[in-house]
Image (spheres, rainbow, N blue to C red):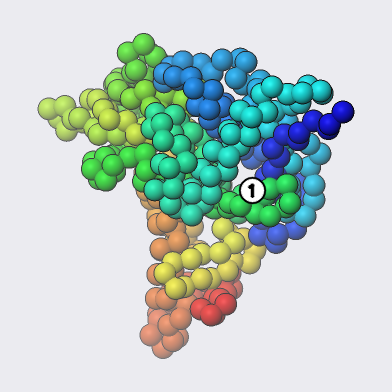
Amino acid sequence: MPKPERHPAFSFHIEGRDQEVHSAPAVVLVRLLQNAQLAFDLIGAHVEGREIRMRARIPAATSQRFQLICEIPQTGSYAMPVTVGQADGLFDLDLGLVKRAYEVFRSLVQAVSKHDDVGVAAALPDERIRRRVLESLKGMAPPADSDWKLSLHDEADAAFASFDTGIPAFVDSILTTEEQREAGRVITGELKSIDFTERKLTLIYPPTSKELACIYDEDIEDMLYARRRDLIQVTGRVLLDDHGAPRQIIDVTDIRDLDLSPVVLDAIRFGDLTIHASPPLSVQPELDDTQQLLCVVQDDLGIDVFAPTRAALLAELNEQLAMLWREYALAPNAELDGKARDLKHALRTRFAQVPHDA
């Protein structure tokens, strides 16, 4: 009797600062596996020839057919082997569909990894499903201030894709037009209600304590099932009332939880400048009085930055520290007064510049 064919298999590799990662935070693994499974559910529905409307749930039979089966994790760069689908034993009638779904997934993540928008469209031509899968792939990527990256390896342990902190911005560039990005504004508010029938959510806008209606498109509805905390951030085109205050958000392009966890940086990069922090720099974002801006202040290092989103705050933090390094840490003592010399000493005690060719 011939041996049953093997199901497609691959592995997620989480690589940290020192490469030798022997464990991974549960929150990272849960987010990674949930988004990867959703991507396979959607791709599976595509290869089955199903028409998936935005509100339609994935059929249970499809989810079971394309489920990811996790195996025992491996050390090194923390590796999580997975198999796509589970063989019944003698002969698996679903194996052809499973292999097709894996090939679509592999082609898609390879194109995303290379920032190849043409390849992304070619890998999954159905635009509506592609948009939902891309949101899932964005959820697999490390956030802007992460100290880890994700690599995907095949059964021969050869890497075929790598997701770093630049992946979410690339996916956003595909999912939103330049006009939407230019007109987009971020509003932080308290989530009051969601009306899935009318595709509307209602926020309490902190500066005015008034309700703010947000009209979203079906394409981003998946985001709402996982984001139901009190404070969320909505990006879209903001309509103002007669007093110049927001009254409605339309053309919503992004919905995310407000993340106020500490920002930890072991390196600051801006242009051709890289400086390493020893120990890693940990700063605590806080909301300003309007609750619309995230702020970080650390007087001893001259840090005072603010931005509407966590990613923008990280960019501002890198830019300001690079400016402080050039203006103070590299300046001759003769050009600095007492407070400026103290700042120079604090910077040079905490950071060290990495040669450009390194």
- Where's residue 188, x and y in %? 37, 33
Q: Residue at x 71, y 39 (%)?
A: 9
- Around disc 1, counting alpha carbons within 10 Å, would you say few (fewer than 14), some (14 to 19), or many (20 or more)? many
Which amino acid, by three-letter code, is at mark 1?
Leu
Compared with 100, 65 (above or below) is above
Q: Nearer the viewer, residue 277 or 335?
A: 277
Q: Is residue 145 shown to the viewer in this render?
A: no
Q: Residue at x 69, y 43 (%)?
A: 10
Quadrant of the image containing the N terminus: top right
Compared with 4, 168 (above or below) is below
Using residue 173 as the reference point, say whether residue 103 is left or right of it.
right
Using residue 91 as the reference point, say whether residue 171 is left or right of it.
left
**Where, by quadrant of the figure, is residue 281 drawn?**
bottom right
Q: Which residue is mark 1?
A: 152
Compared with 110, 88 (above or below) is above
Q: Residue furthest top?
A: 197
